[in-house]
Amino acid sequence: MSRGADAAGVVVTLASALALAPTSAFAVDYLSADEAAQLMFPQADRFESRTVAFDAGQLQRLQAAGVSPRSARWQVRVALRDGATLGYVVVDDVIGKFELISYAVGIGSDGAVRQIEVLSYRESHGYEIRLPAWRRQFVGKDASAPLRVGDDIANISGATLSCSHVTEGVRRIVAMIGLARQLGTLG
Amino acid sequence: MNGPRASSVALRRARPLLGTLVEVGVCGDGDAALHAACDAAFDAVAQVQRALSRFDADSDIARFNALAAGGRLDLQSHTATVLSAARQLFVDSDGVFDVSLGSAPTGWLLDGTMLHKLHADAHLDLGGVGKGHAVDCAVQALRSAGVAGGWVNAGGDLRSFGSATVELKLRDERRGGVVDFGRLHDGAFATSCFAAGARSRLTASRRVSTHSHVSVAAPSCLLADALTKVVAASGDPRHPLLARADAQAWLH
């Protein structure tokens, strides 16, 4: 172990002499979907889960609005207080070059994004993340079965992590909720 | 190693901001108070983003870039702070650090909070310091909220403070996966990747050749972020500016 710059109180203790050899996977769980929903709608007295299903014509409408629908069925948590709808929470995941990000979007009853929270982050080797099987193990995962890889409190330093996939995903969800509200399928 | 490990961390949250994942970790008690502190930190980052992002048409930077030569703009305090630091870094690095990315290094002039456009070609891009400044502001928000220790990580530009010590892992930009690097206590750390196809670009003639990653530890994240560019562009991991900033660099 060697000590890095500490002239100004900065202390970096090196793991090794920068032997950047074997790479490992990395994962963090931030919030469960339920915790995120509570944070987004603290006034809600309950959340109701609804399934929104679009037919081919409706999917075409989404496509025409400039979003690729990706899925015909969505699970939506509806935030309610005294029976009135406060908003909606949708959980989704996106895959990047080396990462998988699960996130939740909170949308108000006016259809506008209220909050976006990342639920979990997985970093791995490129070839692993591109395998559908690797991805499947995270689909439908909840806080009761967290997958923890590597050190839970580590921080990644790197340059190319982009959240453009999340941004696209949020746009898709906003359009989907908008259409579902128009169609009256969210109650 | 000073201070306890961050294993006493009470809460970690992350949001997509600054075009990347921004993570906030806090140590302490009281769930509601810690969540409120995290919210304040994210708000601070969003505020910096609104001032500095060249992709946001209402930001100071986008408005400056759209100005005609001879025009001027009254800046928000975030923008004035970062541009003032950028001008100093430009002078101290003998022009290596240039937020005009070579478009017109002396084509802008900051006078207090007034930014003048001297040359029509002058376009500013604070990608090289803005994220670092946002992290510093978020840490300030956490401190103001009374948080005893924690960290903020904006896609690899990170800073820890107080009782927190965080494990550093470096992402392999070409093959994926992460490797252990070390631990950071009470300071900032930033990594830039300058490999072919990476997001970071260099405009200087001299540059890092055999290594593609530059990491810098510094007292503030703005400095750590900016100094990765100085080291990469100069190719010198012992650039004199590092010692003056109480910083240290690694090429890997």
Image (cartoon, coloured by chain):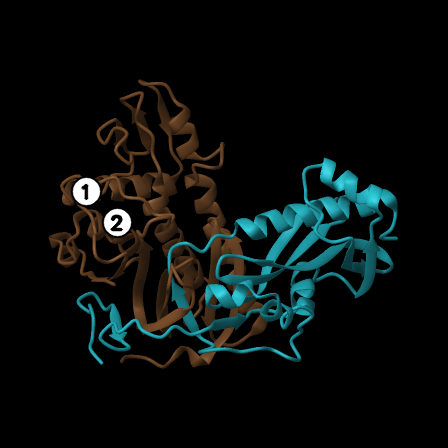
Indicate the chain coloured cyan by its letter. Answer: A
Location of the N terminus of chain A (image quadrant): bottom left
Identify the subunit bearing mark 2: B
Q: Which mark, residue B96?
A: 1
B20 left or right of A61 in image: left
Under mark 2, the amino acid is Lys
Q: Disc 1 or 2, which lies upstream in sequence?
A: 1
Q: Are marks 1 and 2 in contact (CB under 8 Å)?
A: yes
Q: Which residue is mark 2?
A: B229
Residue B152, image quadrant: bottom left
A129 left or right of B61 in image: right
Q: Position of residue A80 (x, y in %)?
A: 81, 59
Identify the subunit bearing mark 1: B
Callout 2: helix, strand or loop?
Answer: helix
Q: Chain B appears in which tint? A: brown
- Asked whether residue B150 appears in the rendered view, the answer is no
Report how many numbered discs are placed on residues in the image: 2
Residue B53, image quadrant: top left
